[in-house]
Image (spheres, rainbow, N blue to C red):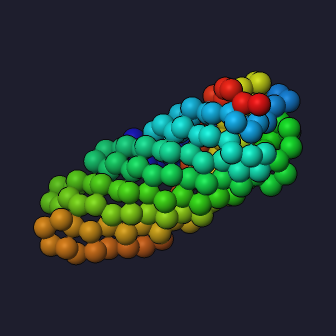
């Protein structure tokens, strides 16, 4: 996807989330969630009213990212809008025109989840991520901080 279109997609997604009136729902202990996020998929398990863990896989162009996330909800209540913060750790593979390799990424994020139906939510979060990549042939390593915005839709099921 053209990087110039990303801000417009984010604004459209935020406007859609704001236009939909929130439903009275929130993640419940023991629930699972399947998520479609840009540009990948996730599987989340809510371990308590305040915490959740998620496995994620993302792919775009010649980059693949596999990792996990920890979520900490601020209030843990049954509100239509749930605010959270968390940590993410990822394994990264890439293939460019002249190089290919692997690396890792770590992110701290803050965001929110708006429930627009009993088991459906729109999620958006953002934060700084440190990304470190190593070229397979030369062992040249490059690392730096990137600002990351994630958004997606989650479908919840199960729970106590």
The percent position of residue 158, horizontal first and vertical second, equals 68, 26
In the image, is residue 131 above or below residue 2?
A: below
In the image, is residue 44 above or below residue 72?
A: above
Q: Which quadrant is the N terminus positioned in?
A: top left
The percent position of residue 147, horizontal first and vertical second, equals 53, 63
In the image shown, does 108 or 76 lie closer to the viewer? 76
In the image, is residue 113 above or below residue 135?
A: above
The percent position of residue 150, horizontal first and vertical second, equals 56, 48
Q: Which quadrant is the C terminus positioned in?
A: top right
Question: Residue at (62%, 40%) from the top-left corner?
Answer: 45
In the image, is residue 133 above or below residue 160?
A: below
Q: Which picture quadrant has residue 137? A: bottom left
Question: Residue at (42%, 44%) from the top-left corner?
Answer: 58
Q: Which picture quadrant has residue 29? A: top right
The percent position of residue 143, horizontal first and vertical second, equals 38, 73
Question: Residue at (53%, 34%) from the top-left corner?
Answer: 36
Residue 35 appears in the rendering: yes
Q: Which picture quadrant has residue 139? A: bottom left
In the image shown, does 70 or 147 lie closer to the viewer? 70
- Number of numbered callouts drawn: 0
In the image shown, does 124 or 45 lie closer to the viewer? 45
Residue 146 appears in the rendering: no
Looking at the image, residue 48 sits to the left or right of residue 45; the answer is right
Question: Residue at (86%, 39%) from the top-left corner?
Answer: 79
């Amino acid at each position: 996807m053209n990087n110039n279109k990303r801000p417009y997609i984010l604004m459209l997604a935020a406007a859609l989330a704001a236009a939909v009136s929130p439903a009275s729902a929130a993640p419940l202990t023991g629930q699972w969630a399947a998520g479609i996020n840009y540009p990948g998929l996730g599987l989340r398990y809510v371990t308590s009213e305040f915490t959740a863990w998620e496995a994620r896989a993302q792919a775009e162009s010649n980059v693949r990212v596999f990792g996990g996330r920890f979520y900490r909800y601020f209030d843990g209540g049954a509100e239509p809008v749930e605010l959270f913060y968390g940590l993410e750790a990822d394994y990264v593979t890439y293939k460019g025109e002249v190089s290919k390799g692997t690396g890792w990424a770590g992110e701290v994020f803050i965001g929110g989840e708006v429930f627009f139906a009993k088991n459906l939510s729109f999620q958006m979060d953002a934060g700084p991520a440190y990304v470190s990549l190593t070229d397979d042939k030369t062992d040249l390593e490059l690392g730096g901080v990137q600002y990351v915005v994630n958004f997606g839709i989650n479908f919840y099921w199960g729970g106590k």
